[in-house]
Image (cartoon, rainbow, N blue to C red):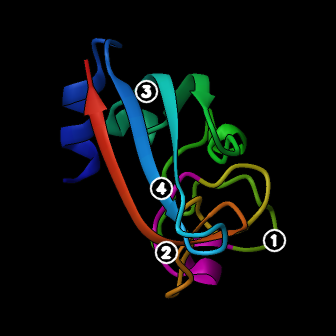
Amino acid sequence: MGNELLHQLTKNGRYKLRFDLRSSSVSNSWYWVEYGRFEILSEANKYLMHVGFYSGRWTDALLSHNGAMFSTYDSDNDSEPTKNCAVKIGGGFWWNNYCHSTPLGSGGDFRWSVSPLTLSRMWLTC
């Protein structure tokens, strides 16, 4: 989809972000998380992400990424002073204070926070 389109869609501040997650470690059970606020700021603001108003049946895995700028291997905007998280983890994301995998994993590691997944769905809602 791309960050510019996410910015254009969410700049009015009326979007929610929802995840449906199927756990592979808990009898293939379904869980959900929702953020009542989801907004991506403009390129001039390094596509800074705001999430808030968490609800759901699983861990709030985006909390530590709230207020982070988007960082890539060639545009290091994370707060980690000694390394580029996008290079270390392998891809762009909104890293904040330290490098760790994205909420949905990285490098073939498909998980929400620390729990392995078999399936996930994500969508924006008004």
Q: Mark 4 or mark 3, which is nearer to you?
A: 4
Q: Is residue 39 magenta?
A: no
Helix, strand or loop for disc 3: strand
The relative height of residue 33 versus residue 14 in the rendered view (above or below) is below
Residue corresponding to mark 1: 82
The relative height of residue 26 versus residue 78 in the rendered view (above or below) is below
Is residue 5 found left or right of 31 in the rendered image? left
Q: Mark 4 or mark 1, which is nearer to you?
A: 4
Residue corresponding to mark 2: 73
Gap between marks 1 and 2, in whole Å? 14 Å
Residue 14 spot, x, y in % from top left: 31, 12
Q: What residue type is labelled 4?
A: Leu
- Crowding near pointer 4: few (<14 within 10 Å), some, many (20+)? many
Residue corresponding to mark 3: 38
Is residue 77 found left or right of 11 in the rendered image? right
Residue 124 spot, x, y in % from top left: 28, 33
> Magenta segment range?
84-94
The relative height of residue 104 versus residue 118 in the rendered view (above or below) is above
- Crowding near pointer 2: few (<14 within 10 Å), some, many (20+)? some
- Crowding near pointer 1: few (<14 within 10 Å), some, many (20+)? few
Q: Which amino acid does label 2 sit on?
A: Tyr
Q: Does the magenta stretch include residue 92?
A: yes
Q: Quadrant of residue 5?
A: top left
Gap between marks 3 and 1, in whole Å? 29 Å
Helix, strand or loop for disc 1: loop
